[in-house]
Image (cartoon, rainbow, N blue to C red):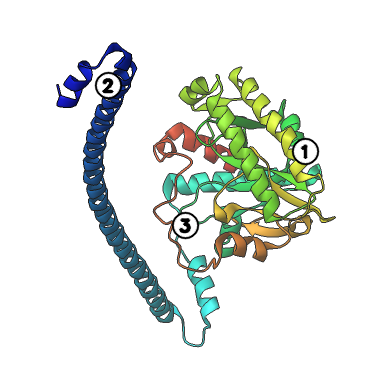
Amino acid sequence: MSLISKAIDRLPSSKRAMRESIQASQKAVEEVQALERRLYAQNDMLKSLQGSIRNSKSIIDDQKARLDSLQRTINELQSDLKAKEARNQIMQWELYRNDGEDLPSAKKRFFRSMSPATGGARLFQQGCAQLLTEFDELCNKHDIPYWIAFGTLLGAVRHGGFIPWDDDIDLCMMRSDIQHIVKMMQNDNKYRVSIIYDAWNFCKQVRFMYRDRRNPCFLDLFIFEETNAPTPDTFDRLFTLRHRMIDEMRSSDLFPTWKSKEFVPVEDPLSRDIERLFAQYREESASILMTPHPNASETEGVIWGIENLDDLNHYRWCCPKSDVLPTQRLSFEGHACSAPANIDKFLSEVYGDIYALPNDLVSHCPHVSEKSLENRETLASIKEHLVSDET
């Protein structure tokens, strides 16, 4: 006890209030002193943390500088590699070019002279080409427009048929025309339309096939819609809607079952629930495709259907209808088929220079397994259809 406290204790009771006030003041001082001690401790901790943060920031800055340097090195290497590839291609083309032959002619000759696929892969290509010929006759008979696209169109122009390492035929059609084909084939004795809901790509896979299920040959039918604004903005808005649709599909109760099955045929009862979701967003997409908005015009156009919309930059196909229709005739594997009205525009926008040496020689993903094309029954069925249609 301090001397002041002892002195206060000896004061008369009349001075008690003063004593209690002083004691309260002393208690407050002690509490302030305790808070100060805590503040000093916290301050020491803060300084320590600041030091750690400075060290961490220094480490982060150092790592960022290293990453930036690495990225610059990668960019330089990529640029150097592209330059070397360009030089090598120029040298290779010059060695390949005949005397007096211009370079474009040499490139065309090179691709036309490439060896075709062999064995079962070539037989499958021939079977698909035959199916395309029959499909073309069917569409001409019923006045149904279609056009070859993507790798099939590229192959027709560059190779006169299949790209040697390709194994499918890509056709584009307006939605109403595909619906017409589906209805026509319901009770057909020779052909059928296969509809599969793909859980990996959230797409509706539509294929024209033979009724004979031993025969794996098929034509991919890609759904296209009409739009009054064939612009990149329309594509982006439809693409945003598609991703909202995919998010809902992923979170739906049906998705675990769909994912476990991977590919759900239209005959599966689950397909009805999947189709309802597609239908919901098809209906919503109508306001994007046809309702006037800032970029709308009187121009008629075509664009991917929401079931198959592809987000790859080289497949962002949205164009005036006049670029597609009326179609023109083009040879594919020796048979005439329908191609878009503006072939050059389509190929340049999708592929750039179609006569550049290709980089998908080994990266192409096969649609039919090599093992299945070694099956005798499968090969026999393909040959049977080739022979029957030749006779």
Q: Which quadrant of the figure contains the C terminus?
A: top right
Tell me the crowding category of disc 1: few under 14, some 14 to 19, or many 20 or more residues within 10 angstroms, Cα based: few
Q: Which mark is residue 92?
A: none
* Residue mark closest to the camera, 2 vs 3: 2
- N-term-proximal mark, 3 vs 1: 3
Is tag 1's residue or tag 2's residue first in the polypeptide sequence? 2
> Callout 2: few (<14), some (14-19), or many (20+) C-alpha neighbours within 10 Å?
some
Judged from the image, the secondary structure of the residue bearing numbered disc 1 is helix
Locate residue 263, reporting x and y percent.
52, 28
Residue underneath mark 2: 23
Type of amino acid under label 2: Gln
Q: Residue at x 72, y 32 (%)?
A: 182
Q: Residue at x 34, y 66 (%)?
A: 72
Q: Is residue 113 visible?
A: yes
Amino acid type at image mark 1: Ser
Q: Residue at x 48, y 49 (%)?
A: 122
Residue 176: numbered disc:
1
- The location of residue 108, given as percent across then percent down, is 54, 71
